[in-house]
Image (cartoon, grey):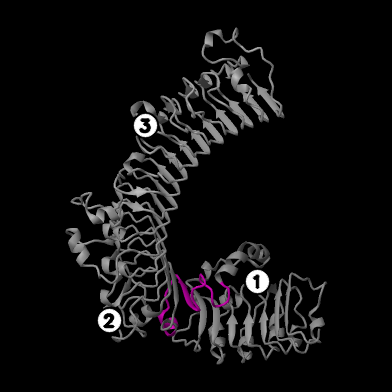
Amino acid sequence: MKELKVLSLTSFSSCVISLYALTSLRKLRVLHLAFFEDLSYLGKLTTLEILSLRTTEFEGLADELVRLVNLKILDLTGCRFSSRFHPNVIRRLSKLEELYLKGSSIGEESDDILLEIKFLTRLTALSLSISSSHFIEDFEFPRLEEYNIFLRGTQDKLGCPHPEQWGKFLEEAARKISYEIQGLNSVVNLTKRSLKIEGVFPYNVVSQLLENLESLQVFDIKDEYIEGLTDQTQLIVSVSVILQNLKQVRIENCMNLEVVFQTEKVEGNEAPPLLSNLKSLRLKRLIDLSCIWELPTQHVRLESLVDLRIEDCPSLKSLFSVFLAQGLVLLEKLKIIGCGELKQIVTELEGDEEELSRSIDSHNSLCFPKLRKVHIENCDGLEYIFPTKIAAQGLRVSTLFIKNCCRLKQVIRVAKDMVENDIMFQQLQFLRSLSSFSVSGCPQITDSVVHLDAEEAYLEGIRLSAFKEPFSGSKHLQLSEIEDQNLVPEANREGLNGLTSLELSQCKDLDCLVDTTTMNELTSAFTHLERLSINYMDGLESLCKGHPPQGFLKNLKELLIRDCNKLQVVLSMDELLYNRVPLSKLQSLELENLPDLRWLFKGSPHSFIFQSLKVVNIGGCGELKSLFSPSLIQSLVLLEKLQIRSCDELKTLLAEPENDDEMESKSSSLPLCLPNLKTLYIHHC
């Protein structure tokens, strides 16, 4: 035990253990304490070189710390002090190399903390939160290798609780603190040198940090530009030098900001391209932003950009020129929300496709090879997502989400003069890699050229037939308020046989899933469907019009139908067709609020066999007079649960459904034989 060098104690009370017990550990070098109430005797641990007291509230610490003269690393992240902490304690820890004060009352409430830091000549790493009232003009930070500094505009914005409420504050903020401040490798784990500024940009204070800055976050600045990112004023550090090193930029709620990156000068011909190290760019609530980059195009490469998020920038008209888009070889995530004036994501040249092709460097095709997730929402001016040239090179997007883009016509732009035998036309017909596709609130979309074979798809408020043979390979399909009359053959002539799950809701024009009366060529439909959910379909009259096609619903296990006012029969078969017995694998049947339902199933004897059915739940079917035919109920050998509620006209469980008027006389006298039935519930019938 006496050889112990590293010790971590968390959530111990002073009545359980006292730091006095540690004074015999002569070789103790590293100590981490959390939620300790009594830190007396801490000052006797003079061999300590690393001390962490994160998210702790205490008093009397200053007297103990001042004696730890061998400390090299001190972490007081999120620590609060019930009495004033004298900052001159910090300067006396002259051997400090790393100091973590972010979220601590030392940095937020002390008037002299910057002066104290100035005495730490060995300091190479600093984490600090400080308000503008404590800024010192012409202050020079030590030569820092790593830093995470948060400069707040006013003391009122700190959100620091009253000392009596600190315990509750800790509980609510612990996750946020641990996320934002995990050493100096924080800020989304991208950078070692980060600067966060809120309310005011004290350029003179931070100028010396800008030269090797990797992460910049700016909030609530009211200027038309951000110093350090534009050369609108005389700067101590060249803008081009700053832009060459930045890895992350996040700017929010800067009302008057018109352009983010702007310079006409580039330092040195052999210097790295501007923004070549930028990995993450997030812009939000910039109502006057009209342009992201005003830079010498030949000196800009976005070759490291992985994550781009633009939200609530209503004046922005485009994101990338063709040249800039060429450099996006690592872009994985693209999110654009609330950009009402956005016309194009990539600004294509006016004129024909040949002119656009000539503008693209043959060695760097325009294809976004790593792009996997695209989210576009509330962009009223956008007419298409991807230019033709990008799509033709082969997109590999896996998740595509589009919502409330009222003018959107195409996912992929197709030139008016392009004909079907064009090579480019043939190349762009498929988005093969889609695993998830969602589009809603886009009433003008008519992308009839492109095959969209997403594994999972959600469509709302459009016509499914607007897409070319849509979702033939999809497994999960969710449709709401679509404008088609049927899914097969109107929307898809192939039968949607790849689907395993289908959810329909509020499709008022849809009167059936399959209509075999309109075509003779359909051989099969929904052969692999396992789950079918239908809700609020006022126009639905039946699942299938005409004879069910080959294998129709043969693998269905779960059927749920609710609130369909016109539905009179779930499924009807006028004659037994060879190898066409549907619903033979059905395990769960739930029918709710079907006011006009008269029969569950209609057909000749043995048209339906329910040897797998376990659960039947029927409610709110006021016109239903019987449930099963005698021949059908003989197959219900696995039925475990039968619930019937609010079926006012129900007279019998067994009857042949052909003739309603003779229901009572033709009710079966056969005994019920349900060997596995465990629950029978009949209410308000």
Tell which of 304 and 581 is nearer to you.
581
Can you identify the residue that label 1 sits on? 55
Task: State the CA–CA distance, disc 2 to disc 1.
Answer: 45 Å
Q: Residue furthest front?
A: 578
Asked if residue 329 lies left or right of residue 567, the reply is left
Is 312 inside the magenta-drawn segment? Answer: no
- Does 160 appear above or below 264? above
State which tag comes first along the sequence, 2 or 1: 1
Asked if residue 552 lies left or right of residue 515, the reply is right
- Does 113 appear above or below 343? below
Q: Residue at x 71, y 76 (%)?
A: 33
Asked if residue 47 lies left or right of residue 384, the reply is right
Q: Secondary structure at mark 2?
A: loop
Stretch of the chain drawn in magenta: 181-208
Can you identify the residue that label 2 sits on? 265
- Tag count: 3
